Each structure stands twice: as structure tokens, then as C-alpha cells.
Image (cartoon, grey):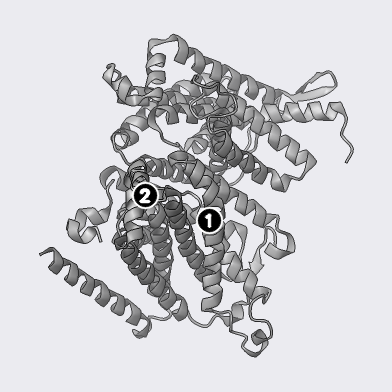
Amino acid sequence: MTLPSPEILLQLSINGALGGAMYGVAAVGLSLIFGTMRLIFLAQGAMIILAAYLVRALFQHLGIDPFLSLLIMVPVGLVAGWLIYQGLFRKAAAEEDRNISLLIAVGVMFLVQNLMTVIWGGNTAAVVTTYTASGIELLGVRASFTRSMGFLIALAGTALVVLFLRKTLVGKAVRAASEDMTAATLMGISPHKVNAIAFAIGIALAGAAGVAVATTFPFNPFAGFIFSLKALVALALGGIGNVTGALAGGIILGLIEAYTQFFISGGWTNAIAYGVFLAVLMFKPEGLFSRPYKKA
Amino acid sequence: MTAMANVSWKWAAALLTIILALVPFWPGAIDSYLLSFLFFVFIYAVMAQGWNLVAGFGGQISLGSHAFFGLGAYTTAILWSGNYLWGSLYETFPRIYYFDPVTMVLSGLVAALAAALIGLPLLSKLRGDYFALGTLGFGEIVKVIFVNGGDFTGGAFGVIAPSSTFETLMPHYWTGLGLTVGTAVAIGWLMRSRYGLALIAVRDDEMAASANGINTLKVKVAAFAGSAFIAGLAGSLYSYYIFHVGPDSVFNLDWMLLPLMMTVVGGTGTILGPVLGAFIMYAVFDVARIIVPDYHPIISGLTIILAMLFLPKGLVRKILPMSVARN
């Protein structure tokens, strides 16, 4: 096999990284929720697709530009996340048996998926704007404009979450609770409060990711679950509980997918992605970026 | 008193089994909706019982049972359509693969072998959520392998078994009932044995179990393989029902999620819980499917959420006295 030209390799890398950032931003949300609640929120992907449908509805019916709808989606996500926690997970979070929260997440996933099917039908939908086809040309490599915007959204979202966790008192409380909930509770941190905050931010990120997905990919109500799985892979690659690692894990996953698609075949993409996932879980469960004796 | 409740409980279960076994003899029952409804309840009850062995009694949450279900279904369909097992006997007895115990057990064994092979590294390295995620990844890998398996697995289309053998649903029904009762009795017996005690000890406190001389890895891998064997049997039974075994139908995540849900609704770590949960949840799903066909998955989703909010410990522990529920 001859090696393709550097331009093609660069193009592959850019496409992979831009697409992978979507997994990354989903993984950041999962990471936050897992951090405080030890819950794999399987419905995160469905939430992202729901957000994508809402973005499309805003665009089609009210003519709001998809990227402008970020200003609506993020606050709505914050409130929705808070409500979801208080209404559905508050009681289960106190239970020792974590199956219960996992199953509620599965129930939410079923509910949201099928609600979307009833409202918008099961067909594939997309948001097409005047700039959907435009791209940015640089050094002979082309990056799609919407994908680049999605990448920027992912970067900005992650950066905001990191700033929040590092610089604010509430953020520090969330981090403390992720490290050791019992000790955090003894220090006067309310578990319900940090759980609800993690959920609110997680769903707000889903809202932002929905904007990115709506503008770049065609989507359907059932695409969310695969998205959740991919986000889980990204999460494991980055190290569970490591927020910047989750974004990086998503980008790495995007690169792996782009390369396997090109060099092997599209049919094996998933197997290789999950193979890497298993290998990381087994041999480097703390993630690819962790330093010994220090948690992010 | 406890012993009395136990004995009368067993008689009631035995009586119910006999009544269920006689249902097909009821006039008109053979073509009725009831029979196919109960058949599906049995398949889900068997799957739920299998998941309950590794997750309920063993404490190792597996999210890969659909992979073992699919492996069992594929093994039966491939052995049959390619005639890998009986050679020239197949020409003399064209129905030899239909509900053939050897084929069915082999299907279970293939699933169990796969579980042992993947369980050994996974269970020695991973705990809790990480094990759950690992099994989920394993399930997706198996599916992709079968989609890309070329002629042997029939690719994305799958394998077709000769459906001309189908006459009535009776063998399906009785085999399903037999597997439901058989797995319940076998696991009930197993949990009273030395091995069952070891498994529960590992679930409750792995460190303490290990300190008491239990080989925890061996116990966990055995439970994982046993649960896969049961799932493989269920898959084999299902392949005799659909005849067309394809990756999207038998590796569907529903085969993992629904039994899991049924077990939790019924009561994890109990013998009756998975069976009761399968019956009730499948009834809810099916009634919803008939009455409000467009909305039924929404109702299923709602039911799970409500069940978890109000019945987190499972139905069995709520409605039956503790001494009975524990068995």
C-alpha cells in the first residue's frame, strides 16, 4: 500500500478532528454527570438530537440562524438539566443501587427518542442554510465552515466548563464532590446541589452540541444512542472525570474513525473504535492523559 | 411458618407451570394471541434470569447480553443452514435441526465460551462501571464482526434457516416454558449450593470473600459464562421463531435493555423477580402497542421511569413476604 500524499493525510486529520469534537463535547457532559453521580447518562445523545431538532424548528419556523440559537439553547438546557435532576434523579441519586439511575436514564432515552419520532417523524432531517456548503481553504486543505464552527463551539464550551470548575466556588464544590462525595458532604457541600449543577451544565452542553450537530450532520431520532456510545468511548480515552481529556478523547476518536474509514473500510470503523475503547479500559483505565497521583 | 410458606409456594409454582403447559390444549388456543404473547414472555424471562445471575446475584453489571443472545441465534442458524452438525443424517431427517437439543446446547456453549474468553481479561481488570462499559463495547464489536463476516455470517443481511419446518407455535411455547422453569429451578438450586454462596459473598464484599479463600475471578467468570449460556439458549429458541437471523434483529440492544429493565422491575437478586418482571413489563409494552400503536415506546419509557421512581427495590420484594421473595 502506498502512503497517500501529505495533503490527503492533513485533510483526513482535519475532517476527523472537526467531527470528533462533537463526540468530545458530548463526552464532557457525560464526564460532569458521571463525576458527581457515578451515573452513565445514556440519554445524553438523545438530548443532543432533541436539541438539534429544536434548532431546526427555530430555524424553519422563526427564521433564527442556527448559530444564533445557541443563545436560546444553552439557557434552556441549563434549566432543563436542573429540572430533569430534581424531577427524576434526585431520589435515585440517594440510593446505593446505581442500576436505578441508569434505568431512569434508559427510560428518558426511550421517551425522548420516541417523542421526537411522534413529533417530527422518523426520517432523517437536516438544517440547510446559505453557508452550509461553504468552506475555509488553507494551505491546500479545505475545512467545512459549519464543522469548523462546531469545533469552535466544542472548544469554547469545554473552556467555559473548565473555567467554571477551576475558578468559581461552586465549580470547586462540583470537583470536590467528584473526587469524594462523602468528604465533600462533610465539608457542607449539598450533594443534591452539585448533582443538579452537573446535570444543568451537562444538558446545556447537549444544547450547544445540538447546534453543532444540526448544522453539520443529517440526523434522525435514533441517532442519539450511537452518539452516547461514541461519547463513552471518548470519555474512556480521556480518562473518566477528566473534562479536557474528554474533549481530547473525542478528537482522538474522530481521528481514529477518519483513518480507519480511509485505510481499512467504513464497515470496521465501529469495531476498531470499540476495540481501542476496550484496550484503554483494560490497560490504561485512568485515560491517556492522566499523570500519576494527580487528578484533573 | 417460613417452611410452610416455602412449601406451599413451591406447590403453587408447580401448579402454575402445569396450567401453563396445558394452555395449548385449550380449544382455539393454538392460533390465539395468548400463545405468542406467552412465548415472548418466556424468551424475555429466560434472558432476564440469565442477566440476573451475573448482575443480580454476582453484582457484575453486564451490558453485553444481547451479544450472547445473538451468538446463540447465529450459531443455531449457521449450523442449520450450512448443515455443519448432522451431515448425511440431515437428508434422511430434514427436520433434525428443528428444536434439536444438541444444536441448542451448542448455541448456548458458543455464547458461554465467548463470555469466558472475554470475561477472563475484563473481569480480572475491570470493576463496576468499567466492566459494564467494557461489555457494552464488546457487544458492539461482536455485531460489527458479524456484519463483516462475509459469506459465513451472511453480512448485513444475515442467515436464513429453512422456515418450511414451521407448523405450529407449540414447540416454541413448550420449550420456552421449559427454559423459563428450568433456568429458575437451576439457578434457585445453584444459589443454595457452595458456589451460589461464594457468588453472593463476592457481590457483597469481594475483599472479604477473597480473604476467605474464594477464587473471586473464577466465581465471577463462571457466573458471566453461565449467564451467557442462558442467553445463548434464548437466542437459539428465538432463531427457530424468526428463521431470518440478521445483525440488526438479534444484536439489537433491546435484547439487553428490556431484560435488564424487567429484572430490575421484578426484583434483582431474586429468582421470581425476573419472571414476574418479564410478564408484567411485556404485558405493559404489548397492551400499549395494541391500544396506542404510535405512542407505545413513549409509554414503555414512562413505565420504566415510573417503576424506578416508585418501585426501586422491585415488585417481588413489595408483594411477597420476604421468606418467599428471597427464594
Q: Which label belongs to residue B115?
A: 1
Q: Tell me if I can see residue A69 in this picture.
A: no
> Residue lying farthest top?
A167
Q: Is residue B146 left or right of residue A27?
A: right
First-in-chain label (2 vs 1): 1
**Which residue type carries mark 2?**
Gly
Q: How crowded is mark 2: few (under 14 residues within 10 Å), some or many (20 or more)?
A: few
- Is the residue at mark 2 from the same chain as the one at mark 1? yes
**Count of all numbered marks drawn on residues in the image:** 2
Of residue B163 and residue B295, the one placed in the foreground of this image is B163
State the image coordinates of residue B152 (x, y, percent, origin top left).
71, 64
* Looking at the image, residue B279 lies above or below residue A154: below
Name above or below for residue B214 compared with residue A13. below
Q: Position of residue B34 (x, y in %)?
A: 37, 73
Q: Position of residue B221 (x, y in %)?
A: 47, 53
The quadrant the N terminus of chain B occupies is: bottom left
Horizontal side, residue B102 vs residue A17: left or right: left
Q: Which residue lies furthest to the left in this view?
A: B1
Label 1 is placed on what type of residue? Ala
Chain where mark 1 sits: B
Q: Residue at label 2?
A: B213
